[in-house]
Structure formats: structure tokens, C-alpha cells
Amino acid sequence: MAAEGGADVASGPATVALVCLGNICRSPMAHVVLADRVSEAGLEDRIQVVSAGTAGWHVGKPMDPRAATTLSEAGYDPTRHRARQLDESWFSGPDAVDLVLVMDESNRTDARAVASAVGGDHADRVRAFREVDPEGPGEVPDPYYGGQDGFDEVLAMVERCAEAWVARWSDGRVG
């Protein structure tokens, strides 16, 4: 469970959730890349990565084929992903996550609404994925309605930010 200043992973694995709208493009791409970087850093026993969408349209489905192809062509394995939906259990109970990293402001608003529904102050666990981007903070644009260049742009952002998050967590705290 998240504490002031972040979760201490020495007490057990911290869970980081990547969240977008449908959990078929941005958040699964971020999930796959971040999990890869966590593993490369030797932190997989201390940090668990999950992803979800704020909407439930695609629950149980694989990621968008364009996102999967983009990841595959870059050397990642997108095959295990199945879309999930963020719900109240992610902010309380046994499935509670320590940090929710959202792709855009709409996702932040929706995730904070879910967090506030359980009572208490859980909204502080919801942060912007790109807040650590070396090229500057901002939103991760939704590539769904565009062409391949949008997926390539998202992958580049995700890789930069995944590196930055893992570097930040190398001290053993997630938050």
C-alpha cells in the first residue's frame, strides 16, 4: 500500500498500474515496456506492473493489432496482454495498487473519481506517466484514430519514460 513519499518495496512488491481509456493502445504499450525495463534493472521481485482502462469496452481482448505490431517490431512481446478495467479494488483491499500512472488528463480525472469512490485520500496515487519525461511533461496522445506514426511516437515516449521511472525507483521506493 502506498505511504507518504511512496511505497517501500522492501516490505513486498509494489504494484504500478498504467492507465488509459480502453487499455488496448497506450497503457498496454507502456505496461510491456515498463515491465521489460523493470526486469532489466533486476527489480521484478520488487515491482509488479499492471495496466487497465478507465472504460470497459475492450475487457478481455488483446491490444490493438497496430500497438502489438509496433511493440513486436521493436523487440517486445505483446502477446500476453488482455484488457482490464480500473475499478475500486485497485484503490482498496488486496488488489490495491501503489501508483497509478495515467496517459492523459481525462484518464487522471476518471481514475481519481474511482479512487474517491472508495473513501479516504487515494487520489495522491494517481500521477501522470510523462511527469518524468526528459523531453518535458505532457500527455501521451491516443494513437487509435491515427496512422502508424502515432504508435511510433507513443512507443518513443513510453521508452523514455519507462527508463526515467525505473531510474527513479532504483532507490527501492515507488511513488
Image: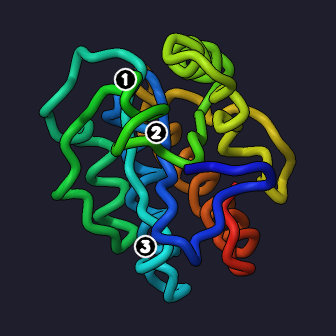
> What x and y, as percent, mark residue 123?
67, 26
Q: Is 88 or 163 nearer to us in this picture?
A: 88
Residue labelled with disc 1: 87
Residue lying at 35% horizontally and 32% vertically, measured from the top left: 23
Under circle 3, the secondary element is: helix
Q: Quadrant of residue 131?
A: top right
Q: Distance between the Cα atoms at labels 1 and 3?
A: 25 Å
Q: Callout 1: helix, strand or loop? A: loop
Question: Mark 2 or 3, which is nearer the eye?
Answer: 3
The residue singled out by tag 2 in the image is 26
Q: Position of residue 166 (x, y in %)?
A: 64, 71
| Amino acid on which the number 3 mark rests in the picture | Asp
Residue 36 tag number: 3
Residue type, label 1: Asp
Q: Are marks 2 and 3 in contact (CB under 8 Å)?
A: no
Residue appearing at x 51%, y 74% in the figure: 37
Q: From this view, report whether residue 131 is shown above or below residue 5.
A: above
Q: In the depicted view, which residue is nearer to us: 56 or 46?
A: 46
Comparing 32 with 47, the one in front is 47
The amino acid type of the residue labelled 2 equals: Arg
Going 74% across and 79% down the picture, which residue do you hit? Answer: 171
Residue 52 in percent (x, y) is at 37, 35
In which quadrant is the C terminus drawn?
Answer: bottom right
> Label 2, label 3: how many angstroms apart (C-alpha)?
15 Å
Q: Earlier in the sequence, mark 1 or mark 3?
A: 3
